Amino acid sequence: MLIARQKKQENIAEYLLYMWQVEDIIRACGGDIDLIRQRIIDGYQGLSPEIRQEMTDWYDNLCEMMRIEGVMEKGHLQINKNVIIELTDLHQRLLKSTREPFYGAAFFKALPHIVELRARSGNAEAGEIETCFNALYGILLLRLQKKAVSSDTEKAVQAITQFLALLSEKYKQERAGELEL
């Protein structure tokens, strides 16, 4: 919860990947708050009882939201889908803006990789931004499992990472009222 709050303020892309990881952690624990407390929250040393309770409430609320929204097995919470929607909207506005040529260049550098990844995934309905996040999350999971990643995939990930880093920076600027399109 503390990490999520910080990431949301600093880097929206890292926040979303973190939240997808939290969803998977909740699934791994079967949405059982006692198991989450035991396996996750209790692992943090030196927390005040207030912070520990705040974390427990946060995870418990996420568990309840996942149950209500029917994403306990797979899928993403609406709050996380909303981030994709916001980023997609910003992405479209940035592409149309004549004030953001570097953004367009970063996107078009990543676009061939995005198209290829979308075709490989079989999820033709996913937009460019969602495809980017799916790719980065997949790589994150592979690395956590210590599985090899091909050099072509590494190139794709690098282009996508650079593109999403720029989109995240533009999102932060927009939130601060500093972005003029």
Image (spheres, helix red, strand yellow):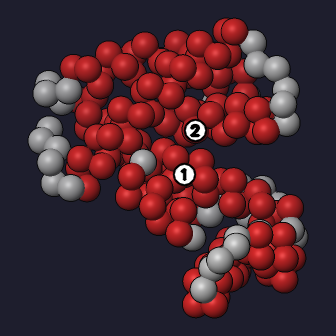
CB-based contact (under 8 Å), mark 2 and mark 1: yes
Q: Residue at x 65, y 77 (%)?
A: 46
Residue at image point 60% right, 86% down: 48
Residue at position x 64%, y 31% in the image: 135
Please state the horizontal and vertical placement of residue 117, each as a whole percent of the image: 65, 22
Residue 63 quadrant: bottom right
On the rendered structure, is 85 left or right of 151? left
Which residue position is annotated with label 1? 16
Kind of residue at disc 1: Leu
Give the farthest residue toward the top.
Answer: 152
27 relative to 123 in the view: left or right: right
State the residue position of label 2.
133
Q: Residues within 10 Å of mark 2 (few under 14, many from 20)?
A: many
Q: Nearer the viewer, residue 132 or 122?
A: 132
Q: Is residue 97 above or below residue 36?
A: above
Does 121 sit left or right of 28 as displayed? Answer: left
Q: Secondary structure at mark 2?
A: helix
Q: Secondary structure at mark 1?
A: helix
Judge by depth and name the residue closer to the eye, 45 or 125.
Answer: 45
Q: Report the amino acid beneath label 2.
A: Phe
Mark 1 or mark 2, which is nearer the start of the sequence?
1
Q: How far is disc 2 from disc 1 in space, using C-alphas?
A: 8 Å
Give the answer, above or below, for where 25 lies relative to 153.
below
